Amino acid sequence: MRVGIGYDVHSFVEGRPLILGGVKVPYHLGLKGHSDADVLVHAVMDALLGAAGCGDIGKHFPDTDPQYRGISSLVLLKDVIAHLNNLQWVVGNVDAVVIAQAPKIAPYIEQMRVNMAREMGVATNLVSVKATTTEGLGFAGRGEGISAQAVACIYPATNPR
Ligand SMILES: Nc1ccn([C@@H]2O[C@H](COP(=O)(O)O)[C@@H](O)[C@H]2O)c(=O)n1
Ligand SMILES: C[C@@]1(CO)OP(=O)(O)OP(=O)(O)OC[C@H]1O
């Protein structure tokens, strides 16, 4: 069994949708990025890649490559899983936290779990998403952006538990 950690931050901008866990969350601001800037999926991918010792998303999907401009991060997540499966790793579970002062994301968390679990080919109960504010402190508290942290556990395909 191996574990990995992921962390990502994106700043708010006007004129883009806010995509978290593949869900379009209603809000007057979106996140800035080369892809759809889905900070939650990015943290999850980095945790998975880290567990397998395979670097990070910037290595696999460079933000200088036009093919990733505006891409859904769920597509990239599916690619990360294919990469891990090729190396004979299977996902045990993922746990993540979204750190945002606003908007309130609790109503959308179940759909985020469903979306990510579908792309990962695992049961929804193996994908956990939580949310917290920072009680007004720091960049998240000032409403400048959103961060996400994730941990992932992977197993050898030959010994999945
Ligand atoms: N962007 C967020 C932040 C938090 N939540 C939910 O609210 C609960 C209370 O958050 P605190 O930071 O005050 O502890 C938290 O447990 C989340 O369920 C949210 O939905 N969206
Ligand atoms: C996801 C990628 C894809 O080009 O672009 P961004 O949306 O800018 O996201 P970031 O978290 O900066 O990671 C880099 C890239 O892999």
Image (cartoon, rainbow, N blue to C red):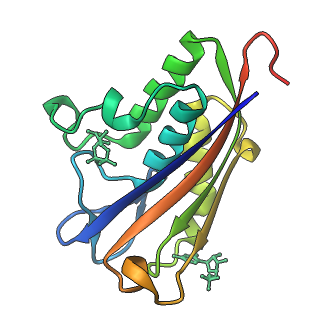
Q: Is residue 17 above or below residue 155?
A: below
Dividing the picture into quadrants, the one containing residue 141 is: bottom left
Towards the viewer: 4 or 81: 4
**What x and y, as percent, mark residue 113?**
62, 50
**Residue 3 vertical placement versus 41 (above, below):** above
Q: Quadrant of the C terminus?
A: top right
Residue 36 at x, y = what percent? 29, 49
Outermost residue, right side: 161
- In the picture, measured across the screen, residue 118 lies left or right of residue 43, that is right
In terms of depth relative to the viewer, which is nearer, 110 or 13? 13
Write the residue at 46% across / 87% down: 137
Q: Give the residue at x 73% y 42%.
A: 126
Q: Residue at x 51, y 78 (%)?
A: 104
Left or right: 120 as drawn, with respect to 38: right
- Nearest the eye: 114 or 132: 132
Give the number of marks.
0
Task: Name above or below for residue 106 compared with residue 6.
Answer: below
Residue drawn at 53 percent across, 65 percent down: 98
The spot of residue 128 in percent (x, y) is 68, 53
Residue 145 pos. (x, y %): 34, 71
Nearest to the observer: residue 53 or residue 121 = 53
Residue that extends furthest to the bottom in the rendered view of this protein: 136
Quarter assignment of residue 1: top right
Q: Quadrant of ligand 2?
A: top left
Along the horizontal axis of the image, is 133 left or right of 147?
right
